[in-house]
């Protein structure tokens, strides 16, 4: 068995693990990242596109913001279209100046990977059999397989940044964790194309035929989504079928402007609301999707991962810089307060914008539920106080400081 030692062991090289590793390294806190797949595989996942200001500030603090600041686009607002009638949510005006940045998760991940490599910081790709040991002790360690050898990694703390299907959350005994879950009766079919976006800002569409979202990655690369039944697969959706359906769900003037082209990526993501409580167990901390999942309707997934990273980064900096270990117990409560705000907003936006068809929702028929949601959306879109609620949640609730 080969032995390694570090201060903070990070499991997962998604945005959570990479951003945390970069921030800790800037404070001189030694860390090693273990990743199950290759770097190219991680980069091949097409996911989020909207960054809250808190995330942007964190990437700048990590010293990895150069490309984001030049290629990312500041968005002052977005549209919500209901059966073709558009309402613009003026983020900047409604939140006294706050905005979001449109810059793909893939690009952020690429920037963080390159920064880690340039700093010669350790990241082991294609590890397997990762097992967390003695996380309740003050000397936890991880065992894993790498390049045909068995390793033991001794550390002070473990950051479980290994996503929803990772090993970290399951390390917390079932009787010590509570899992809250809502699985939605539909999925999102996403398509990426090298075509100019249909609009300068995002358009969230509610239509009789179901939800659609027009987003982007640059002036020449678009990202679109359609609500589809969970029984669908990408084989059911040719590019032509996708474009035809998107046109039927977009507002008419946007549909006329739509430039179609070959898909460079197509995938279906299930929608789920999920929270694990607590987010820490001994010296193990769950970060990002390892601890929580939101339907992407509120653009919160990646942004909640960032606020977890921010809180854990502040705690570990205090531990190693000031020798203050009392603050460790604050992580879960602080992270969960902001997570639940993101969960509620994402659940609420999903309920208002999707068509539940014949799927009964809680104790009422879907049609009745849809009518309630239509009325709720109508009120929020056509009253400034309602638009302010949407705007303040969309730009993101403030990050909470440690006590
Ligand atoms: P990630 O899942 O990104 O990364 C976890 C990493 O851990 C992975 O690289 C994985 O390979 C690795 N890992 C897992 N098990 C391991 C093990 N045992 N050992 C070592 N490594 C292990 N959010 C939005 O805001 N907008 C969106 O539109 C959006 N779309 C999404 C679409 C899909 C299909 C998915 C799954 C998520 C989407 N999200 C979206 C949410 C997404 O962006 C996440 O919030 C974000 O990836 C969270 O980052 P991480 O916490 O790093 O988790
Ligand atoms: C995206 O661009 O992928 C995106 C943007 C906003 C969302 C979801 C996805 O709410």
Image: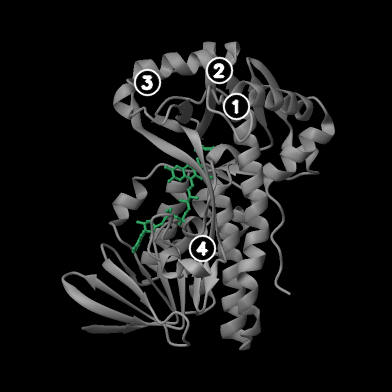
Q: Find numbered disc 3 in the image and state the secondary structure of the residue it sits on.
A: loop
**What residue would you read off at disc 2?**
250
Q: Residue at x 54, y 41 (%)?
A: 295
- For label 4, the SS is loop
Describe residue 6's horizontal placement relative to residue 377 as left or right: left
Among the two numbered marks 2 and 3 on one chain, the one whose residue lies closer to the N terminus: 2
Residue 343 numbered tag: none
- Residue furthest left as drawn: 148
Which of the two discs, 1 and 4, sits closer to the camera? 4
Measured Cα–Cα span from mark 1 to mark 4:
30 Å
Location of residue 34 (image quadrant): bottom left
Residue bearing the label numbered 4:
287
* Chain-order first, disc 1 or disc 4: 1
What crowding class fits label 4: few (fewer than 14 Cα within 10 Å), some (14-19), or many (20 or more)?
many
> Is disc 1 surrounded by few (<14), some (14 to 19) or many (20+) residues within 10 Å?
many
Residue 290's spot in the image, x, y percent? Answer: 47, 59
> At 54% across and 71% down in the image, what residue appears?
280
Relative to residue 386, is residue 272 depicted above or below?
Answer: below
Q: Is residue 73 among the parts visible in the rendering? A: yes
């Amino acid at each position: 068995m080969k032995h390694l030692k570090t201060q903070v062991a990070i499991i997962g090289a998604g945005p959570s693990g990479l951003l945390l590793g970069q921030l800790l390294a800037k404070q001189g806190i030694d860390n090693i990242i273990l990743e199950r797949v290759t770097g190219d595989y991680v980069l091949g996942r097409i996911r989020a596109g909207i960054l809250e200001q808190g995330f942007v500030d964190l990437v700048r603090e990590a010293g990895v913001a150069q490309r984001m600041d030049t290629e990312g686009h500041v968005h002052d607002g977005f549209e919500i279209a209901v059966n073709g009638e558009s309402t613009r949510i003026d983020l900047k005006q409604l939140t006294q100046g706050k905005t979001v940045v449109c810059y793909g998760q893939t690009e952020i991940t690429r920037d963080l990977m390159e920064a880690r490599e340039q700093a010669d910081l350790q990241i082991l790709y294609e590890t397997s059999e990762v097992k967390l040991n003695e996380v309740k002790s003050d000397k936890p360690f991880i065992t894993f397989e790498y390049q045909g050898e068995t390793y033991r990694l001794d550390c002070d703390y473990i950051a479980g940044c290994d996503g929803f299907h990772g090993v970290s959350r399951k390390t917390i005994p079932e009787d010590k964790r509570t899992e809250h879950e809502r699985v939605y009766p539909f999925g999102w079919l996403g398509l990426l194309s090298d075509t100019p976006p249909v609009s300068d800002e995002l358009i969230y569409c509610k239509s009789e035929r179901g939800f659609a979202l027009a987003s982007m990655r640059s002036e020449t690369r678009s990202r679109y989504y359609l609500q589809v039944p969970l029984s669908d697969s990408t084989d059911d959706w040719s590019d032509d079928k996708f474009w035809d359906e998107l046109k039927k769900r977009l507002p008419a003037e946007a549909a006329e402007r739509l430039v179609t082209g070959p898909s460079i990526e197509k995938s279906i993501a299930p929608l789920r609301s999920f929270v694990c409580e607590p987010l820490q167990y001994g010296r193990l901390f769950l970060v990002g999707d390892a601890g929580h999942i939101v339907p992407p309707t509120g653009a919160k997934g990646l942004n909640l991962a960032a606020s977890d990273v921010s809180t854990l980064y502040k705690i570990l900096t205090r531990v190693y810089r000031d020798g203050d270990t009392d603050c460790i117990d604050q992580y879960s409560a602080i992270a969960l307060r902001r997570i639940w705000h993101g969960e509620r907003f994402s659940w609420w936006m999903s309920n208002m914008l999707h068509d539940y068809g014949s799927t009964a929702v809680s104790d009422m028929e879907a049609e009745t539920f849809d009518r309630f949601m239509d009325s709720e959306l109508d009120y929020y879109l056509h009253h400034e106080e309602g638009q302010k609620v949407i705007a303040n949640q969309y730009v993101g609730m403030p990050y909470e400081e440690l006590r």
